[in-house]
Image (cartoon, helix red, strand yellow):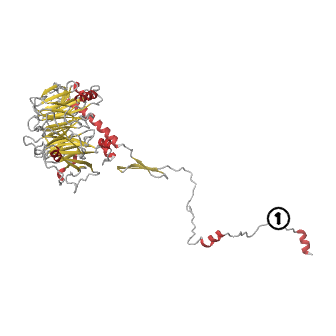
């Protein structure tokens, strides 16, 4: 009865239901993971930022920054700093284009040096480089190199060391080297037995740019073809030496003469240290640079030099010829790093030097000449060698029998093998000098000991033009093609006379003759440039018997280029042929 009454008061609500356990069926992958997927595993629990404590403050946070600096800088970092909560930022050094800066400083310093020298020498009443007293009638103006230096003269006022050789750079037209002999009287023990070479800039005649010394007598020399930072020389003892003009002066000898210290640079490398059979056993008669860039473009052969070496001016060989007919070809090699302690393998390399010569090939001209013509009597002496500018694989060699030999470095057959004078037969005449045209024409000049001058074409055995009486029978000792005009060349004989030739004006003989007296002419060379912005110039550098060296700037008639001159010269040579 009681439950019946209570049921009337209580009512159960069945509107909300839920399941206490919902277990879906397990698939095969879950069963596999449950059985095998948790093997070799370990579960670890980590709580992060549990020690972080936040506090409320009323003042603002102070901003801080740390700054540091270091001197000298270690690497590229010289200073730096860091802010609050920031990483350290390093202030790197500014990026500098070193080659461009060096090129600019080199050019700017040269201009400043010339201006300072002109300003210094202007008010001085003594020696003046631009004196007009020594100007020759064939010149517009002249200057004189200061050879009155302590190591070039004795107690007298004139130069004591005679000039043996002059050589101008074809790459840098204002650079010149003069080779001076031994002094007439003892002066300085460190220099009395050594030959001196002076590298000049004709725009700065007050003193040489570099002074070099050599223990053996220098018979010939030449600069590197592109940039005049290497100087090569051949000696009477048969060695070939090279000076690297870029070397630090601190590795060379200092000698105090008077109140000044002078740096005398010894050779960077000498072939005397190569104890092999490739060395010359006779005096070296000629040293010539052999550029590989032109030859590579024309003959499409692989060059042993990289593009960087070609741009730096080191893509060339050097050829040396001795009087016995041995022509050696050397590769110019620049080492990546200098060893101040010296090299154990390269015995000819100075400690701290980087440039050396490696023998590449040898051409024995005596064998060629002995089998070329049965008219030869005895051994033929070779006097000079020149390489064709447009194709350095071809070369010509002057002999002491009036003939000029033609050959190639690869020993290929050439035609003609010999260049002969107009007179038939064999004559005891020395071909003293040879010079190729610098204007791309395959023609060359030859000056002989009988006074004859010959103009040869590379493809003809006999000369196009020959002048037998232009020097009145006096031996031709110097012959140079003009660097500004294709039809002008200059000659020197052994009687101290200079001859100026202009083939467009006259092809019968010289158009001007100048005798040098009383201070006789010893040697001469030609310098010039046709592409100068302020006008071309053609200069004769004359070394006198007294040791004085002066620069004669020829008249503009023979220096200034003429319109269509090369075409007119080609027409003249075609008519002569």
Would residue 101 appear left or right of 521 to someone viewing this image? right
Residue furthest to the bottom in view is 1
The residue at the far right in this view is: 1
Q: Position of residue 66 (x, y in %)?
A: 44, 50
Q: Position of residue 480 (x, y in %)?
A: 19, 33
Which element carries disc 1, helix, strand or loop?
loop
Which is nearer the eye, 134 or 559? 559
Pointer 1: what residue?
A: 15
Vertical comparison of 79 with 5: above or below: above
For the residue pair 63 and 47, the one nearer the viewer reads as 47
Q: In what quadrant of the picture does the N terminus appear?
A: bottom right
**Residue 134 falls left or right of residue 341:** left
Q: Position of residue 273 (x, y in %)?
A: 18, 53
Q: Quadrant of residue 393?
A: top left
Q: Residues within 10 Å of mark 1 (few under 14, many from 20)?
A: few
Q: Is residue 443 visible?
A: yes
Residue 264 seen in the figure: no
Q: Nearer the viewer, residue 158 or 57?
A: 158
Towards the viewer: 5 or 148: 148
Relative to 325, 59 lies left or right: right
């Amino acid at each position: 009865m009681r439950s019946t009454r209570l049921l009337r008061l209580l009512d159960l609500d069945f509107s909300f239901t839920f399941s206490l356990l919902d277990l879906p069926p397990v698939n095969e992958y879950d069963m596999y993971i449950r059985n095998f997927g948790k093997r070799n595993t370990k579960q670890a629990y980590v709580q992060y930022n549990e020690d972080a404590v936040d506090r409320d403050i009323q003042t603002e946070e102070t901003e801080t920054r740390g700054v540091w600096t270091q001197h000298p800088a270690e690497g590229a970092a010289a200073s730096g700093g860091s802010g609050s909560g920031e990483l350290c930022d390093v202030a790197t050094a500014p990026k500098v284009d070193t080659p461009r800066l060096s090129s600019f400083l080199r050019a700017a310093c040269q201009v400043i040096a010339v201006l300072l020298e002109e300003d210094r020498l202007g008010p001085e009443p003594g020696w003046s480089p631009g004196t007009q007293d020594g100007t020759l009638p064939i010149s517009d103006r002249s200057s004189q190199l200061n050879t009155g230096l302590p190591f070039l003269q004795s107690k007298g006022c004139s130069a004591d060391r005679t000039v043996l050789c002059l050589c101008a750079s074809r790459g840098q037209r204002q650079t010149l080297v003069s080779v001076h002999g031994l002094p007439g009287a003892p002066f300085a023990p460190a220099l009395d037995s050594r030959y001196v070479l002076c590298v000049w800039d004709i725009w700065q005649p007050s003193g040489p740019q570099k002074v070099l010394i050599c223990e053996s007598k220098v018979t010939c020399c030449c600069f590197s073809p592109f940039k005049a930072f290497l100087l090569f020389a051949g000696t009477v003892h048969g060695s070939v030496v090279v000076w690297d003009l870029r070397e630090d002066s601190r590795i060379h000898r200092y000698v105090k003469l008077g109140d000044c210290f002078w740096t005398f640079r010894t050779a960077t490398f000498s072939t005397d240290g190569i104890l092999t059979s490739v060395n010359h056993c006779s005096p070296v008669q000629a040293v010539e640079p052999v550029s590989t860039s032109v030859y590579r473009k024309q003959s499409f052969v692989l060059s042993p030099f990289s593009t960087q070496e070609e741009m730096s001016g080191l893509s060339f060989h050097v050829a040396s010829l001795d009087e016995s007919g041995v022509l050696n070809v050397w590769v110019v090699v620049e080492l990546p790093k200098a060893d101040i302690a010296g090299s154990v393998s390269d015995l000819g390399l100075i400690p701290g030097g980087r440039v050396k010569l490696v023998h590449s090939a040898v051409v024995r001209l005596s064998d060629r000449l002995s089998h070329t013509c049965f008219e030869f009597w005895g051994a033929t002496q070779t006097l000079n060698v020149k390489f064709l500018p447009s194709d350095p694989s071809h070369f010509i060699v002057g002999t002491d029998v009036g003939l000029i030999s033609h050959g190639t470095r690869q020993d290929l057959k050439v035609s003609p093998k010999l260049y002969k004078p107009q007179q038939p037969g064999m004559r005891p005449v020395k071909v003293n000098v040879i010079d190729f045209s610098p204007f791309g024409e395959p023609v060359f000049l030859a000056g002989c000991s009988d006074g004859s001058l010959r103009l040869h074409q590379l493809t003809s055995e006999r000369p196009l033009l020959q002048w037998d009486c232009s020097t009145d029978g006096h031996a031709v000792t110097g012959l140079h093609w003009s660097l500004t005009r294709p039809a002008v060349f200059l000659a020197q004989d052994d009687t101290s006379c200079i001859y100026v030739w202009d083939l467009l004006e006259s092809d019968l003989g010289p158009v001007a003759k100048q005798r040098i007296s009383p201070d006789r002419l010893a040697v001469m060379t030609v310098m010039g440039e046709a592409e100068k912005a302020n006008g071309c110039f053609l200069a004769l550098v004359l070394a006198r018997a007294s040791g004085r060296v002066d620069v004669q700037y020829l008249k503009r008639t023979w220096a200034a280029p003429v319109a269509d001159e090369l075409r007119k010269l080609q027409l003249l040579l075609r008519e002569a042929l």
